[in-house]
Amino acid sequence: MDDAGTAALASGASARRYPRRTILKRAAAIGFSSAFIPTLLAACGGGSAEEATPSDAAPGSPSPAPGETPSGETTGGIVNANTTLGDKGIGNPILNGNDYWTEWLVFSKLTKYDDEGNVLPDLAATYEYSEDGLTLTLSLVDTTWHDGEPFTAADVLFTFDTVSDPNVDTPYGSRLQVGGEKVQYEALDDRTVRITMKEPFAPFLFGLSQIGIIPRHLLENSADINTDPFNLQPIGTGPYKFVEKQPDQFVRYERFDNYFKGRPAADGWTVFYMVDANAGAAALESGEIDMMFTPPEMQPRYEDDPDYMLLNYVYFTPITLAFNHKHPALADINVRRAIAHAIDRKTLNETVTKGRGLLANNHYATTGPLDRYNNYDEVNYETEYPFDPARAQRLLDEAGWTPGADGIREKNGQRLSLTVLTYAGFDEYKNDQVIIQQMLGEVGIEITPQVLEYTTLEGMWHDPNDDPMGRAMEVQEWPHPFEQDPDVFNELHSSNVPPGDNYMWFQDAEVDQLIDQGRTTVDLDERVQIYQQLDRRRMETLPALPLYCAVDGWVVSRRLGGVPEDTPSFRWYQRAFPEKIYKQG
Amino acid sequence: MTAEAQSAPLSSRDLTATKRAQRPLALTWRRFCRHRLALASAVFLVLLVAVAVLAPWITPYDPNATDLNLARFGRPAAPSLSHPMGSDQLGRDWLSRLIAGSRVSLVVGFLATGVAIVAGTLLGAIAGYAGRWVDTAIMRVCDLMLAFPPLLFLMGALTGIRSPTVGIIALVIAVIGWMNVARLVRAEFLTLRTREFTIAARAVGASTPSIIFRHLLPNAVGPIIVAATLGIPAAILTESTLSFLGFGIQPPTASWGNMLQGSFNYMRDYRAWWMGFYPGLLISLTVLAFNFLGDGLRDALDPYAHR
Amino acid sequence: MAGFIIRRLLWMLPLLLGVSIICFAMLKRAPGDPVAAMLAESRSTGQNLTLADRERLRHQLGLDRPAYLQYVDWLGQVAHGNLGMSTRMNQPVADVIMQRLPNTMKLAGVALVLTLVIALPLGVLSAIRQYSLLDYFLTTFNFIGISIPQFWLGLMLLYFFGVTLGWFPVRGMSSPYVEPGFWNQAKDTVLHYALPVASITLVSLAGYTRYQRAAMLEVIRQDYIRTARAKGLRERAVILGHAWRNSLIPIITLLGYVLVILVEGSIVVENIFSWPGMGQLAAQSLSQRDYPVVMAIVLLSATLILVGTLISDILYAIVDPRVRYD
């Protein structure tokens, strides 16, 4: 057991600052046996922090009555946030590169996903699939746009039309396509929309939840939606209205009193553009902003600070060491297995995530919404590929890679020298590279780490003629599923090799088949079964080696109310419930 | 005097001797003061270069070797007996990385300046001596590069190059640094070209290259040396700024610039002051030393040009 | 003289053309293009551009044409006064730049004025009181000022005065929560300008004071100063009347280069202090491969540099009648 982690956990538990779920999470990360956990939980006594439903544990309850929380605090105030994505001046949520906060504060979706993977009704009060999974019927709420015009099904249809228009610069065109064909949609009346598709498609609902609904009455006669002035002065149905923007400085939003979910908790929001992480941290400290995304190396400072909450957010899928299967050496499964045995994933995780990350023994995070798809019976990377450098060396010897004069293995005159790429901006990945370089060096593999700009990497990924010798492995979160949906079609299916998104060139017939099945099965239980088989097959074929589930953190000032301290993902909470966050005092 | 000596043309050696005799031998109190600093700086720099050259043999640890036990949970280790300047978040010895980094930073500085000086001198000499359209052409190219905003040029040139090598970075820095030297040399050549010794040399049939290299260039050497000494610290500062912006030498190769850049978070959140203090100190001291040296040299070589 | 000016102005056009060609070539060499940048961004927010989308976007932006044709298209546009559309922001480039240029100019302007106002008297003082404590202090300060990396200085100021002491805000030009009223706004503005201006000024001060001191020293040694003293003029009259003005000559020549220094310093300082200016715009546009914006910024900066050096050359000729341009 690790003393530092234990001490931190024990002191946190006895200070009653950690509710039950967090303790379980942290205990799992540190590797406690299940026997020790009851003792740890007992240490926090029967305090108020042990609710079963996390949302009740927060000082601000989920649905405050206008102006007051059950505990009597008044809501209101201006919430200050920042964005590091830079000012692109696009307020329209369906356009490429649109502004993040505008999308979630000013606009609504048909449905949203919350921080636990549940589907939340938004503009669609209810939704229902037909028996055969081919028809989806949505019932819409009765509300108005920020300018007072009524919201109707016509707006939804207009949004769908716009998104499917090839002249519109939107990334969402593919969300309305199933089986290669555009879905059909119609309005049964002012409050009902029906969507019909050619075959059942499980990820459809998640894709639909990404499309912000835009007003027909303001945009239907637009000459060019891509450059319409609406984009600089957007109007939506969300909890906050857009007020003004100072280019590259900030955007101000104001409460929309007639929001259909009830009066929003804060008076308004101000979002500052701050591209540099150091500048953001400085602004947080000086109180100019109230919340900020922080990578692991910035987090320890806020851990015991009484003025801030450190909301750790575990990524739903692990950071992996992804293999380029076009590379001649890595195409050999035994070389990949050897690499898996040569890496001490536990120490890597601890060092790089400062003890916060969860060691990844499956393909989805244990604490995330995709956990139900993990095959715990048959899949455990720790038991299948334990840290065993001796075994790694044996496997490499057997594969024909024998140590050369300088210690680096060779075969047929080729040295086993591999490049590991990652993209700039994350210290964590760079640290990963260095540690992997050291560990693989011990078994005779020479590693050259390189750090590239994201844009450059993107170019390489989609180039069918990209040279695998220059990109043997990557430290990445590959393959990405579809965020809240486990589908990995885009990145793991053999039909999507570059110029598609399967940029690691992985090809396996059984994996293909399971992916196809998983997409077209709408019934949840059946789907779970299929993905568990896929889980096992992935472990056998090693497209990538899961390392750890990265833990990023949002540091949130305690001046803010309506933020539950143990939300599994603040990132999703702020998207699902922005109207609950407010500033106290 | 023999008949030989009377009729022989003035060689460049005579000229140099004449010029040297012109420098005042009696040092004033002020110049001696400056001179002391310049001397101290020279000593410091010689030591620094020695360290950089011997780097692979004198680093106490391998600068790239991680020690995950030293840096438990990614916490940089404070200076101690075994690691006099502490470690970073992966347990790499900071002193060793500083020594290794000295090599990188100094090589970038010397190489960039060297290339800039050579290119600038050549182009300036040709422009100054040949005159007319050659001069115009070269000077216009000079103006072109001077008009280009330097940092943007560097950023544009280095964008997307993965792990740029010391050579590439030095080359790119040189590309924006040769112009001043060229102008300087050209100015010198323009004046010298009309002097008697040049005309005399041409009259006896000396070839153009020989005139340039044996007669004119040695007289321009003074300002060139000063430009070189002041160009090196500028190149080092530029490299560290590029690292700050993410364009310079990429980790894990150590350069003072990227060591500084990677230290900010740890200084603030882990109070790991040593991570930023030492590289910053070394950069500043090195730049300072070169500046003193350059100032001293300028005084010694041409005391009437207070610029 | 007039001929000199006209010739310089005429040369500006081909020089700017050359600058634009070099810039375009560099942008094209860099791997990735605006669409790759869009894809990268879309990933981070959970959107996903499909291959078909990307092809369509590339065609829309003309990226599937050969590079030299793209340049010719761009040149044609500019000749008609159209700087193009920003690929990142879907707004005309001219708008995007005009939103941010004044901010950089304000920052640079304030820093420049402060530098001159402080450096001139200090340099003069340092020269006439040579070898005094003041002189040594200033000389040391100067040397340190030119040795410290500017981004280091900026970050130190940010952390010490902005975060630890909390005396100054750490981002931007203004706060959205300022009470209306002239004095409130003025105070807010001054507070926001303080640290970024200090970062630039402290470094440029070091350079300027040195030059001013050296220039002043040289002037003092001149014969006509000795004559003035011999005539019985008070020292003060000598300095303020004669010496000071003549020492301005080298300073004026530097003014042209000041524009370069300031526009460049802004990239780093704006990054640290989240100042909404051209420096930030340039850095972000470059990483997002927003070609039209980068081209426009480089062209603008180059023009500023050329105009600046021309002005300083003209001033030099006016101030020092010994200088002749042939």
Image (cartoon, coloured by chain):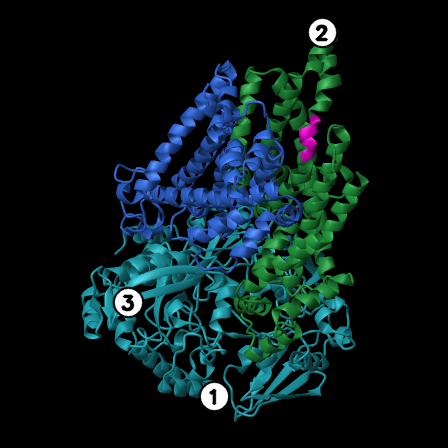
Chain colours: A cyan, B blue, C green
Q: Assign the magenta stretch its main secondary structure.
A: helix
* Residue that mark 3 sits on: A416
Indicate the position of residue B154 as horizontal and vertical percent values: 55, 51
Q: Which residue is mark 1?
A: A520
Q: Magenta segment: does it hold C252?
A: yes
Q: Tell me the crowding category of disc 2: few under 14, some 14 to 19, or many 20 or more residues within 10 angstroms, Cα based.
A: few
Relative to residue B63, is residue C141 depicted above or below? above
Numbered range of the magenta stretch: C248-253
Q: Are marks 2 and 1 in contact (CB under 8 Å)?
A: no
Residue displayed at 46% across by 87% down: A523
Q: Are marks 2 and 3 in contact (CB under 8 Å)?
A: no
Q: In the displayed structure, would residue B214 be above or below residue A251?
A: above
Q: Along the horizontal axis of the image, is B109 left or right of C272?
A: left
Query: Could you give the CA–CA distance between mark 1 and mark 3, rounded to whole angstroms?
Result: 41 Å
Residue at (46, 18) in percent of width and height: B1
* Residue most extreme to the right: C2
In percent of width and height, residue B108 lies at 44, 45
Q: Quadrant of residue B187?
A: top right
Please, what is the three-letter code of the amino acid marked with disc 1? Thr
In this figure, what is the number of numbered marks?
3
Query: Which quarter of the figure has residue B201?
Result: top right
